[in-house]
Image (cartoon, rainbow, N blue to C red):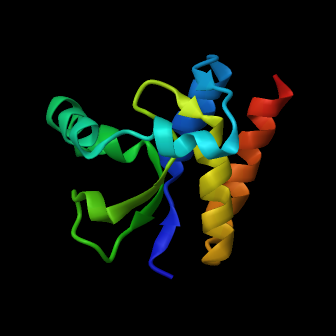
Amino acid sequence: MAVKLNRKALEHARSLIKKGKVERDIRDDWSEHAPSTDDENEYLDKHGFDDFAKWHLGVDREKSEGTKGSVSFPFGDFRKAHRCAIISLESRAAQYDHDDIAKAAKELLELIDAE
């Protein structure tokens, strides 16, 4: 499978959660809380692709490096990790047999819910 766990993003998510930078929202909120295309482009312009990629648990090395298409499974809004995003991505990752990403998402949810 081309999509693999982005370990830098996992560490970034863990760090955000440990610092309390997490939105404890419910599953269906992600459609409203997800960054827009304009938000993504603005973040990319200001922070670069490496920082942008740290907000996505999936990375596809077969896609053109440094493009939005090479990352997937976003977990936050560039300020906080969102519980709703992690719930959503865990389900999608499991559906498409990205077991390492689904397992990482489950771990993140456990961290969020433990606090």
Work out whether residue 104 or residue 73 is closer to the camera in this orientation and state it: 73
Which picture quadrant has residue 93? bottom right
* x, y percent for residue 20: 64, 17
Which residue occupies the extreme bottom position in the image?
1
* x, y percent for residue 14: 62, 34
Which residue occupies the extreme right position in the image?
114
Query: Is 71 located above or below residue 1 in the figure?
Result: above
* x, y percent for residue 32: 48, 39
Q: Residue at x 32, y 77 (%)?
A: 62
Q: Quadrant of the C terminus?
A: top right
* x, y percent for residue 59: 42, 62
Marker count (numbered): 0
Work out whether residue 29 or residue 18 is closer to the camera in this orientation and state it: 29
Query: Is 94 located above or below residue 57 in the figure?
Result: below
- Left or right: where does residue 17 sit relative to residue 12? right
Q: Residue at x 44, y 24 (%)?
A: 79
Q: Residue at x 43, y 59 (%)?
A: 72
Which residue occupies the extreme left position in the image?
45
Which residue occupies the extreme top position in the image?
19
Query: Is 75 located above or below residue 22 in the figure?
Result: below
Which picture quadrant has residue 84? top right
- Left or right: where does residue 6 sit relative to residue 18? left
Q: Residue at x 74, y 41 (%)?
A: 109
